[in-house]
Amino acid sequence: MKGVILAGGTGTRLRPLTNLMNKHLLPVGKYPMIYYAIKKLADAGIQDILLVIGKQSAGMYVDYLGSGNDFGVRITYKIQDQAGGIAEALSLASDFIEANEKFVVLLGDNLFTDSLLPFVQEFQSQPEGAKVILKMVDDARRYGVPVIEGAIIKSILEKPENPPSNYCVTGIYMYDNEVFELVAQIDPSSRGELEITDVNNLYAAKGVLTYNVMNGWWTDAGTMESLHEAGAKLKEGE
């Protein structure tokens, strides 16, 4: 399997830090944020990685990561010219993923302690469809929340006022090659972006969206508070 890391976000909630550099290069513990996503994929046995970045700090990514050789992986870079949503960024991977090939997608600001290996192994044996990784949270109203029926997800509700569960959908996704056809079917949201929840709901409607639950620590390091929390937590684990 291959891996795709989406790191093109502008990090508006982390300004003024992100006026200087892309948020995925900000320090978290002893390393830049992007280091952890690459290490998680490498530790799961994924060696071919596409890194989707914005124009800001593109040279810094290359200076730090190079070809990926120092990390035991092979990195391909692609520029997302403007913010168009997670699904739009994902579509840039269409010529990186072979026909009938499955792959893992990480949002570069998702930091966590669980190993991806058991999730990846389970998805490799899944005949078709997609998988999302869930995490139990205190306030699910802030996230996409799954409607679970047995081993599959029936739908995902975006920031519901009355969540059907205490689980949220993290920024860790696994797809078969059909995902690019599904991205082409969705329309931009009211924000003018192609939303990944809409893509996941197309898989859910077909009955082929599975899930695993993450047991360890997880955060979306998109705010000053979560960035500081991540730095302290990951420094502890070194």
Image (cartoon, grey):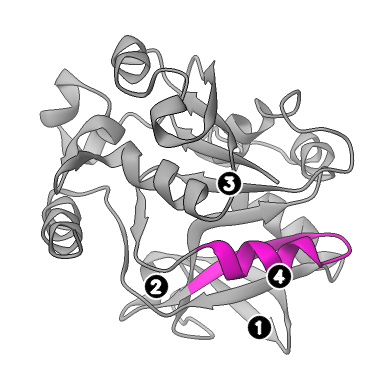
CA separation in Å, label 2 and label 1: 16 Å
Query: Which mark is first along the chain, 1 or 2?
Result: 2
Residue 93's label in the rendered image is: none
Where does residue 135 sit, x and y in percent of width and height?
44, 75
| Category of crowding for the residue at label 1, using alpha-carbon neighbours closer than 10 angstroms: few (below 14), some (14–19), many (at least 20) | some
CA separation in Å, label 4 and label 2: 29 Å
The amino acid type of the residue labelled 3 equals: Val
Who's the residue at 41% across and 46% down the image?
39
Q: Where, by quadrant of the figure, is residue 54 drawn?
A: top left
Give the residues drawn in magenta, as a range: 116-134
CA separation in Å, label 4 and label 1: 18 Å
| Category of crowding for the residue at label 2, using alpha-carbon neighbours closer than 10 angstroms: few (below 14), some (14–19), many (at least 20) | many
The amino acid type of the residue labelled 2 equals: Arg
Q: Nearer the viewer, residue 204 or 171?
A: 171
Q: Where, by quadrant of the figure, is residue 16 drawn?
A: top left
Tell me if label 1 and label 3 are in contact, CB under 8 Å: no
Query: Which mark is first along the chain, 2 or 4?
Result: 4
Tell me if label 2 and label 3 are in contact, CB under 8 Å: no
Q: Which residue is mark 2?
A: 141
Q: Which residue is mark 4?
A: 122
Where does residue 120 sit, x and y in percent of width and height?
64, 61
Question: In this rendering, which labeled residue sits more in front, label 1 or label 3?
Answer: 3
Tell me if label 4 and label 2 are in contact, CB under 8 Å: no
Q: Which residue is mark 3?
A: 105
Q: Which residue is mark 1?
A: 148
- Where 236 sits versus 66, above or below? below
